[in-house]
Amino acid sequence: MSHYGPTEDSEQSPTYTHRAKIVVVGDAAVGKTSLIVRYVKGVFNPGYIITLGVNFFTQDVSIQDKTLRYIIWDTAGQERFGPVRKKYYLGARAAVLVFDLTNLQSFENVDFWIKEVEGICGEIPMILVGNKADLKPVVKQDAIQDFTSRHNLTYIETSAKTGMNSIRPFFLLAPLVIEELESTTDGR
Ligand code: GDP
Ligand code: MG
């Protein structure tokens, strides 16, 4: 189990006002782990990062007087094993749906990932991310536009390699997550 970011000290009052689990989902090799590591640590590791076991990361986002602590869960290379996946979704307050702009199949599978998240989490805020924007795209812009308007999703193109837009999906989801948290009684 790996844990990045500040550790919690129960003796001190927390530095955040809200806390939420967020999941990053999509086909294997689309760059989920790379995007998380880029967002949390600001680096890119060009090798294939084999994620086994439970991996989670923490990152704080501040909006005005509020600070949301994301507990970011990585699907840990278990994209293929249905039953094992469930625990990754349980309790998630938002989802980042990632596909690879150079891999058409990964885009076509986004529908599957949405159903998977909704099946376990219900309707939580989601955002669509086309990653590897530094490479020549294969997925057509009009297909993406059609998909996002049908599903009412915000769409962001990212590159974990260059760092382009790597903060944006998490940043844009934050106010929606805070709003959801505040509308439920369990606070943070
Ligand atoms: P995951 O299986 O979805 O977690 O994907 P990884 O983060 O392990 O990335 C899979 C492969 O894609 C690795 O070789 C990464 O270096 C590469 N990769 C990830 N993001 C990008 C990107 O934005 N641009 C490019 N060119 N390669 C990327
Ligand atoms: Mg991974």
Image: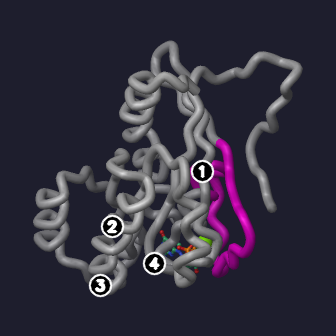
Decide if residue 73 is on the left or right side of residue 181: right
> Which secondary structure, mark 2?
helix
Q: Earlier in the sequence, mark 3 or mark 4?
A: 4
Identified by mark 4, the residue type is Asp
Query: In terms of depth relative to the viewer, which is nearer, 185 or 150?
Result: 185
Q: What is the distance, in whole Å, between disc 3 and disc 2 at their CAs?
A: 19 Å
Q: Earlier in the sequence, mark 3 or mark 2?
A: 3
In what quadrant of the picture does the C terminus appear?
A: top right
The label shown at residue 137 is: none
Dot 4 beta carbon under 8 Å from ligand 1: yes
Q: What is the distance, in whole Å, between disc 2 and disc 1 at their CAs?
A: 20 Å
Which numbered mark, 3 or 4, is in the foreground of this view? 4
Q: Quadrant of residue 78?
A: bottom right
Residue at the spot x=54%, y=32% of the render? 61
The residue under label 3 is 104
Q: Which residues are magenta?
A: 37-58
Q: What is the distance, in whole Å, between disc 3 and disc 4 at their CAs?
A: 11 Å
The label shown at residue 27 is: 4
Identified by mark 3, the residue type is Leu
Q: Earlier in the sequence, mark 2 or mark 1?
A: 1
Decide if residue 186 is on the left or right side of residue 183: right
Identified by mark 2, the residue type is Lys
The residue under label 2 is 115
Q: Is residue 39 magenta?
A: yes
